[in-house]
Image: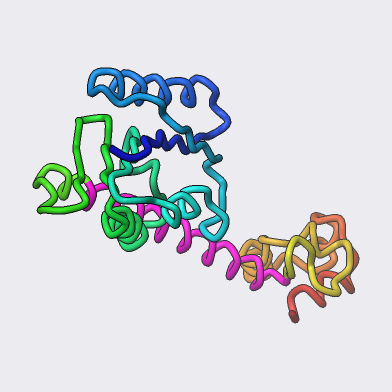
Amino acid sequence: MGTVYGYNRVSTDLQDNESQRKEIEVYAKAHGLVDIRWIQETISSKKTDRDLYRLIATLQTGDIILATEFSRLSRSGMIDLADIVGKIRAAGADMVIVRGGHVIKATGEMDIAAQALLFAFGLAAQIERDQISLRTKAGMAKRKAEGYVGKKLAGRPEGYRKLAGKRAEINDLLKIGVTKVKLAKRYDVTRVTLNRFLAG
Protein backbone atom coordinates (compact mmCIF):
# COMPACT_ATOMS: atom_id res chain seq x y z
CA MET A 1 0.00 0.00 0.00
CA GLY A 2 1.20 3.51 -0.80
CA THR A 3 0.88 6.74 1.15
CA VAL A 4 -2.39 7.59 2.89
CA TYR A 5 -3.44 11.23 2.55
CA GLY A 6 -6.13 12.92 4.60
CA TYR A 7 -7.52 15.81 2.57
CA ASN A 8 -9.18 18.54 4.57
CA ARG A 9 -10.53 21.62 2.81
CA VAL A 10 -11.58 24.00 5.53
CA SER A 11 -13.23 27.29 6.32
CA THR A 12 -12.55 29.61 9.24
CA ASP A 13 -14.85 27.47 11.39
CA LEU A 14 -12.44 25.65 13.72
CA GLN A 15 -15.15 23.27 14.89
CA ASP A 16 -15.83 22.20 11.30
CA ASN A 17 -12.10 21.71 10.68
CA GLU A 18 -11.75 19.44 13.69
CA SER A 19 -14.90 17.53 12.76
CA GLN A 20 -13.54 16.66 9.31
CA ARG A 21 -10.24 15.49 10.72
CA LYS A 22 -11.91 13.27 13.31
CA GLU A 23 -14.16 11.63 10.71
CA ILE A 24 -11.16 10.77 8.58
CA GLU A 25 -9.17 9.47 11.56
CA VAL A 26 -12.05 7.23 12.68
CA TYR A 27 -12.39 5.72 9.20
CA ALA A 28 -8.63 5.26 8.83
CA LYS A 29 -8.31 3.48 12.17
CA ALA A 30 -11.24 1.16 11.42
CA HIS A 31 -9.66 0.15 8.10
CA GLY A 32 -6.08 -0.22 9.25
CA LEU A 33 -4.84 2.90 7.49
CA VAL A 34 -1.99 4.42 9.47
CA ASP A 35 0.51 7.27 9.21
CA ILE A 36 -1.85 9.72 7.56
CA ARG A 37 -0.23 12.65 5.78
CA TRP A 38 -2.51 15.66 6.09
CA ILE A 39 -3.26 18.06 3.26
CA GLN A 40 -5.20 21.05 4.52
CA GLU A 41 -6.15 24.20 2.64
CA THR A 42 -8.63 27.00 3.08
CA ILE A 43 -11.96 27.12 1.29
CA SER A 44 -10.93 30.33 -0.50
CA SER A 45 -7.90 28.83 -2.25
CA LYS A 46 -7.86 29.62 -5.96
CA LYS A 47 -8.13 26.78 -8.46
CA THR A 48 -4.71 27.60 -9.89
CA ASP A 49 -3.06 27.57 -6.49
CA ARG A 50 -4.52 24.63 -4.61
CA ASP A 51 -2.63 22.06 -2.58
CA LEU A 52 -4.99 19.40 -3.93
CA TYR A 53 -3.71 19.86 -7.49
CA ARG A 54 -0.12 19.77 -6.30
CA LEU A 55 -0.91 16.54 -4.42
CA ILE A 56 -2.52 14.94 -7.47
CA ALA A 57 0.61 15.72 -9.51
CA THR A 58 2.73 13.69 -7.07
CA LEU A 59 0.42 10.69 -6.53
CA GLN A 60 1.82 7.21 -7.00
CA THR A 61 0.12 3.87 -7.68
CA GLY A 62 -1.37 2.53 -4.48
CA ASP A 63 -1.77 5.89 -2.74
CA ILE A 64 -5.08 6.63 -1.02
CA ILE A 65 -6.83 9.96 -0.50
CA LEU A 66 -9.39 10.22 2.28
CA ALA A 67 -11.91 13.09 2.21
CA THR A 68 -15.14 13.58 4.13
CA GLU A 69 -17.34 14.63 1.16
CA PHE A 70 -17.20 15.22 -2.59
CA SER A 71 -18.04 18.86 -1.90
CA ARG A 72 -14.69 19.25 -0.13
CA LEU A 73 -12.87 18.46 -3.36
CA SER A 74 -14.48 21.15 -5.50
CA ARG A 75 -17.08 23.90 -5.45
CA SER A 76 -16.65 24.73 -9.12
CA GLY A 77 -19.18 22.31 -10.60
CA MET A 78 -19.49 18.94 -12.28
CA ILE A 79 -16.68 19.29 -14.81
CA ASP A 80 -14.07 20.29 -12.25
CA LEU A 81 -15.15 17.61 -9.77
CA ALA A 82 -15.14 14.87 -12.42
CA ASP A 83 -11.72 16.08 -13.59
CA ILE A 84 -10.29 15.80 -10.07
CA VAL A 85 -11.66 12.29 -9.56
CA GLY A 86 -10.46 11.25 -13.01
CA LYS A 87 -6.92 12.50 -12.39
CA ILE A 88 -6.72 10.72 -9.04
CA ARG A 89 -7.75 7.45 -10.66
CA ALA A 90 -5.43 7.99 -13.63
CA ALA A 91 -2.53 8.34 -11.20
CA GLY A 92 -3.31 4.85 -9.91
CA ALA A 93 -4.55 6.14 -6.56
CA ASP A 94 -7.74 5.22 -4.72
CA MET A 95 -10.04 7.70 -3.06
CA VAL A 96 -12.44 7.24 -0.18
CA ILE A 97 -15.35 9.55 0.60
CA VAL A 98 -15.50 8.82 4.30
CA ARG A 99 -19.04 10.04 4.87
CA GLY A 100 -20.90 7.05 3.48
CA GLY A 101 -17.82 4.89 2.98
CA HIS A 102 -17.69 5.30 -0.81
CA VAL A 103 -14.50 3.75 -2.18
CA ILE A 104 -13.42 4.90 -5.62
CA LYS A 105 -10.80 2.50 -6.92
CA ALA A 106 -8.17 3.45 -9.49
CA THR A 107 -9.28 0.48 -11.57
CA GLY A 108 -12.72 -1.00 -12.22
CA GLU A 109 -16.13 0.56 -12.28
CA MET A 110 -17.12 3.19 -9.73
CA ASP A 111 -20.01 1.99 -7.57
CA ILE A 112 -23.45 3.37 -8.45
CA ALA A 113 -23.88 5.19 -5.14
CA ALA A 114 -20.57 7.00 -5.59
CA GLN A 115 -21.48 7.95 -9.15
CA ALA A 116 -24.83 9.32 -7.99
CA LEU A 117 -23.21 11.36 -5.22
CA LEU A 118 -20.53 12.66 -7.57
CA PHE A 119 -23.20 13.80 -10.01
CA ALA A 120 -25.42 15.30 -7.30
CA PHE A 121 -22.67 17.29 -5.60
CA GLY A 122 -21.25 18.41 -8.92
CA LEU A 123 -24.66 19.52 -10.18
CA ALA A 124 -25.43 21.39 -6.95
CA ALA A 125 -22.07 23.16 -7.11
CA GLN A 126 -22.65 24.12 -10.74
CA ILE A 127 -26.14 25.50 -10.02
CA GLU A 128 -24.82 27.52 -7.08
CA ARG A 129 -21.94 28.86 -9.18
CA ASP A 130 -24.30 29.83 -12.04
CA GLN A 131 -26.70 31.60 -9.66
CA ILE A 132 -23.87 33.60 -8.08
CA SER A 133 -22.64 34.56 -11.55
CA LEU A 134 -26.11 35.71 -12.62
CA ARG A 135 -26.59 37.77 -9.45
CA THR A 136 -23.16 39.34 -9.86
CA LYS A 137 -23.78 40.26 -13.51
CA ALA A 138 -27.20 41.70 -12.69
CA GLY A 139 -25.71 43.79 -9.89
CA MET A 140 -22.90 45.07 -12.11
CA ALA A 141 -25.36 45.97 -14.90
CA LYS A 142 -27.54 47.89 -12.41
CA ARG A 143 -24.58 49.84 -11.03
CA LYS A 144 -23.31 50.60 -14.53
CA ALA A 145 -26.74 51.93 -15.50
CA GLU A 146 -26.60 54.18 -12.43
CA GLY A 147 -23.25 55.57 -13.55
CA TYR A 148 -20.90 53.61 -11.32
CA VAL A 149 -17.42 52.46 -12.32
CA GLY A 150 -16.19 50.10 -9.64
CA LYS A 151 -17.41 51.50 -6.33
CA LYS A 152 -17.58 55.11 -7.46
CA LEU A 153 -19.70 57.12 -9.85
CA ALA A 154 -17.52 57.79 -12.87
CA GLY A 155 -16.65 61.46 -13.24
CA ARG A 156 -19.80 62.54 -11.48
CA PRO A 157 -20.39 65.07 -8.68
CA GLU A 158 -20.66 63.89 -5.09
CA GLY A 159 -24.42 64.50 -5.27
CA TYR A 160 -24.79 61.60 -7.70
CA ARG A 161 -24.36 59.22 -4.78
CA LYS A 162 -27.51 60.64 -3.23
CA LEU A 163 -29.40 60.06 -6.47
CA ALA A 164 -27.98 56.64 -7.32
CA GLY A 165 -30.73 54.05 -7.66
CA LYS A 166 -33.52 56.66 -7.55
CA ARG A 167 -33.98 57.34 -11.28
CA ALA A 168 -37.35 55.55 -11.54
CA GLU A 169 -38.61 57.25 -8.39
CA ILE A 170 -37.57 60.68 -9.67
CA ASN A 171 -39.19 60.10 -13.06
CA ASP A 172 -42.44 59.09 -11.36
CA LEU A 173 -42.42 62.30 -9.28
CA LEU A 174 -41.76 64.40 -12.38
CA LYS A 175 -44.73 62.76 -14.13
CA ILE A 176 -47.10 63.81 -11.36
CA GLY A 177 -45.88 67.41 -11.53
CA VAL A 178 -43.22 67.69 -8.84
CA THR A 179 -40.79 70.41 -10.00
CA LYS A 180 -37.06 69.90 -10.31
CA VAL A 181 -36.53 72.63 -7.73
CA LYS A 182 -38.49 70.62 -5.18
CA LEU A 183 -36.80 67.39 -6.24
CA ALA A 184 -33.34 68.91 -5.82
CA LYS A 185 -34.32 70.06 -2.35
CA ARG A 186 -35.87 66.68 -1.52
CA TYR A 187 -32.66 64.81 -2.39
CA ASP A 188 -30.34 67.52 -1.09
CA VAL A 189 -28.57 68.10 -4.42
CA THR A 190 -28.21 71.06 -6.75
CA ARG A 191 -30.42 71.63 -9.79
CA VAL A 192 -27.35 71.20 -11.99
CA THR A 193 -26.56 67.81 -10.47
CA LEU A 194 -30.18 66.69 -10.82
CA ASN A 195 -30.32 67.74 -14.48
CA ARG A 196 -27.05 66.01 -15.30
CA PHE A 197 -28.20 62.86 -13.52
CA LEU A 198 -31.44 62.76 -15.50
CA ALA A 199 -29.62 63.44 -18.77
CA GLY A 200 -26.95 60.76 -18.14
Image location (x, y in percent) of residue 105: 19, 46
Residue in the image at 79% along x and 63% along y: 152
**Quadrant for the C terminus in the image:** bottom right
> In the rendered image, is residue 155 in sight?
yes
Image-quadrant location for residue 174: bottom right
Residue range highlighted in magenta: 118-147
Residue at image position (33%, 61%) is 83
Q: Residue 157: where, in percent of width, then height?
A: 89, 68
> Of 91 and 71, which appears nearest the observer?
91
Classified by dominant secondary structure, the portion drawn in magenta counts as: helix
Left or right of 181 on screen, residue 104: left
Position of 91 relative to 15 (above/below)? below
Q: Residue at x 40, y 61 (%)?
A: 130
Place residue 127 in its image quadrant. bottom left
* Number of marks: 0
Q: In the picture provided, is 71 more to the left or to the right than 117? A: right
Nearer the observer, 186 or 20: 20
Q: Can residue 176 be seen in this view?
A: no
In the rendered image, the vertical position of residue 41 relative to residue 84, given as above or below:
above
Q: Position of residue 159 (x, y in %)?
A: 86, 62
Q: In this view, does 66 lie to the left or right of 195?
A: left
Could you say which quadrant of the image residue 64 lies in? top left
Which of the colour schemes (rainbow, by chain, secondary structure, one colour) is used? rainbow
Q: Looking at this view, is 180 or 20 the one in front?
A: 20
> Which image quarter holds the N terminus?
top left
Q: Position of residue 61 (x, y in %)?
A: 30, 50
Q: Which residue extends farthest front?
A: 1
In the image, residue 72 lies in the stretch drawn in magenta:
no
